[in-house]
Image (cartoon, rainbow, N blue to C red):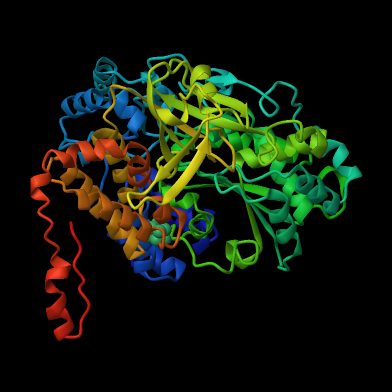
Amino acid sequence: MPENNQISEILKKFNNDRSRLMDILLEIQEKQNFVNEEDIKFLSEKLGVSGGEINETLSFYHFFSDKELGKYNIYLNDSITANMKGRTEVKKAFEEACATPIGNVSEDKQFGLFSTSCIGMNDQEPAAIINNKIFTQLTPYRVRQLVKGMRDGKPIEDLMYENFGDGNNADPDVKAMVFNNIRRKSIILKNDYEPYTFLKGKIRDYSPEQVIKVIEDSNLRGRGGAGFPTGLKWRFGSRTDGAHRVIICNADEGEPGTFKDRVLLTQYPEMVFEGMVIAAFATGADIGLLYLRYEYKYLLKFLNRKLKEMQEQNLLGNNISGIRDFNFSIRIQLGAGAYVCGEESALIESLEGKRGEPRDKPPFPVEKGYLGYPTIINNVETLATAVKIMHHGANWYANFGTKDSLGTKLLSISGDCKLPGIYEVEWGISIKEVLEMCGAEDAQAIQVGGPSGMLIGMKDFDNLDKTTLMRWYKPSGMMVAERFFDRRLSYSDLPTGGSIIIFNNQRDLLGDVVLNFMDFFIEESCGSCSTCRNLPVLMKMKLEKILAGNGVKKDIEDLLSWGKTLKASRCGLGQTAGNPILSSIFNFRHLYERHVQSLKEFDNGFDLEKAVEPYMDFVHRKPMFHHF
Ligand code: SF4
């Protein structure tokens, strides 16, 4: 195999370490615009793994390519909010100006033009990533200007049509035209945070056990969505034996509509890193990893500078803050575009340089995680909140929120409202208050918690009599749910990782919103479970059939039944992939029925399974028909 000096240099930089394959591929791609077959063979030989293994990783992530890309590569966000804010016209303008349909590289190899899942800019859409720079609030005019500049050979930095954004977006190591849009601050975001105060002083008054106790007493729950008690996670992690222990900060916020971690990392990175060091102190961890989604690569240099400053202040490294044997370091690992990596075991796989496929559990990461070591994974917001709790105490924290959902929550609000952005609210806030707060005057529906969450309707937020008890029944008469109004954000009513998308009365909920969400899950499935690989596709096809006016009532029942089957998938992605359809049937069933009712003469009541039953009995087989 002939020597490849460029790749050899890269391999040397990462000590020929197979677990750093993500970094190795990212650097090769950065330098030569793609990773070709020869590169795979070379890597395989040098890393001592099969070409198949290299290819597994390479082919899994959206931002890797085994084909030559363009000189400029445009990844246009395809979130529902982008579509609501004019993405169709922007896409058309890009296609015309770049002379290539989306999903391709132009003939002259100048432009690669691609769709990508939510890039975390829902409050400033339409947006795109071009050669790692973020371009927000695109219009057809701006697109034409941009492409002209690129054709003229200008560096991408010189093509920004807006000043840099607010706060640290204007930092010399960020220089992004991105806005934080922080609209409401409470205990986490308010301006009383002095970086590293706890680490520099008070930490010495605590034992690791005492830190865990404070976090346990605060009842802090994970802010990524699942809501697992943070103190308990730290306790489990601290008790598991291993040559090393690992703290991972999950900064892979990929749920469409959420962008609060992006703002925390931009404006409060010290708080997030301080949270990681406190977690390391509590659990005895010595390895720290922050997994940063590729879409936020523009923050990488800035975040690494912050880590360097911490090292210089002895807040990372050995004997941190003068505490003997408290050794901990943090490395930032860049992802390469895969929503499923937000799932903690998939994230660990990715950190080890593999496909981001979720692992079977048990063992859980606290027992056997990154490279087999006990691993504690916390969300960005959780770690920032832990810092505030250590500053002020568990009793102070109990003053905020509700009995079962203490504290505050950062919401990323977007869609049809006057003031999209970040809102820090106390848990327990009603949906009605949320709508008033962000200036949403004509809401038809709200997606709470992103596509994996729930689509709720007016009955959940516009009921004047707040003592009304509503009940939902199945056609059989069985009650399936009951609720008092208004509905509130809390772990017991409407839990959310933070994404709130508002749709006004002009929006086509099924034809635009639900189909967009289903496309998202289809695109992002890792494909290892047959349920998750197939059912979302079939459900989408069924919905399209209904929308085309060819549906019968049984189609709705099939959708409900398939959605239930999907829950048997291995990880949260598959388990929630049917939610856009399930929750829209649950709350907007009339929209489905409107489409099927008009053609009910097609529902002739013929039951294929029943019809073939005697014959199946005869051959001792069970019917296996499905109605597509
Ligand atoms: Fe992969 Fe989907 Fe199965 Fe999760 S549920 S492991 S994403 S196929």
> Camera-side residue: 507 or 324?
507
Q: Is residue 370 left or right of residue 584?
A: right
Against 4, residue 279 (above or below) is above
Q: Is residue 188 left or right of residue 54?
A: right
Q: Position of residue 193 (x, y in %)?
A: 74, 26
- Above or below, 22 against 222 in this view is below
Nearer to the camera, 503 or 315:
503
Q: Position of residue 627 (x, y in %)?
A: 18, 59
**Whether residue 2 is visible:** no
Mark yes or no: residue 312 visible. Answer: yes
Residue at image coords 23%, 33%? 110
Position of the C terminus by quadrant: bottom left
Judge from the rendering whether residue 442 lies leftward or rightward of residue 16; answer left or right. left
Q: Residue furthest right?
A: 205
Quarter, ligand 1 = bottom left
Residue shown at 71% from the left, 61% from the top: 236
